[in-house]
Amino acid sequence: MSAPPLGPRLGGRILGAVLAGALILASPRISFAQVAANELARQTLGLPYWHVFIAYAVVWLLIAGWVISIARRLSEIEKRLGKD
């Protein structure tokens, strides 16, 4: 059994709630992390953290390649099924 489709009003309410929550969390008045903004602005990451950024970049590239590979294989399967 599949779930019943969401109506346009319920989907709009969910989207509105998500957007409102994102705006509240992004507000500088509510963000507690901005109290020490001057201290954080003076800090530098330095050389020891570059390997973390490089590792994340490599992982994102691998994930992107994997998704592209799946998309290509799926399109080939769809083409084969369409010929029958």
Image (spheres, rainbow, N blue to C red):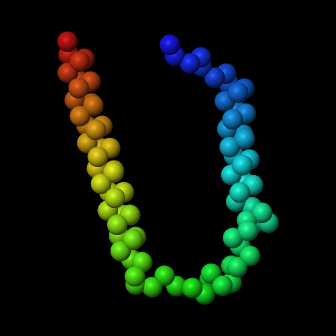
Residue 37 in the figure: left or right of residue 81: right
Q: Position of residue 10 (x, y in %)?
A: 70, 27
Q: Which residue is located at x 27 percent, y 30 percent?
A: 75
Residue 67 in the figure: left or right of residue 11: left
Total marks drawn? 0
Q: Which residue is located at x 52 percent, y 85 percent?
A: 44
Residue 17 in the figure: left or right of residue 2: right
> Compared with residue 43, is residue 1 higher up or lower down, i.e. above or below?
above
Instruction: From the viewer's side, name the closer residue of 84 and 52.
Output: 52
Q: Position of residue 28 (x, y in %)?
A: 75, 66
The answer to which quarter of the image holds residue 56 is bottom left
Q: Residue furthest bottom?
A: 42
Q: Which residue is located at x 35 percent, y 74 percent?
A: 51
Q: Which residue is located at x 52 percent, y 16 percent?
A: 2
Q: Position of residue 45 (x, y in %)?
A: 48, 82
| Placement of the C terminus among the 4 image quadrants | top left
Instruction: From the viewer's side, name the closer residue of 26 and 36.
Output: 36
> Compared with residue 10, is residue 38 higher up or lower down, i.e. above or below?
below
Q: Position of residue 5 (x, y in %)?
A: 60, 19
Instruction: From the viewer's side, name the closer residue of 17 and 71.
Output: 17
The answer to which quarter of the image holds residue 24 is bottom right
Q: Residue furthest right?
A: 29
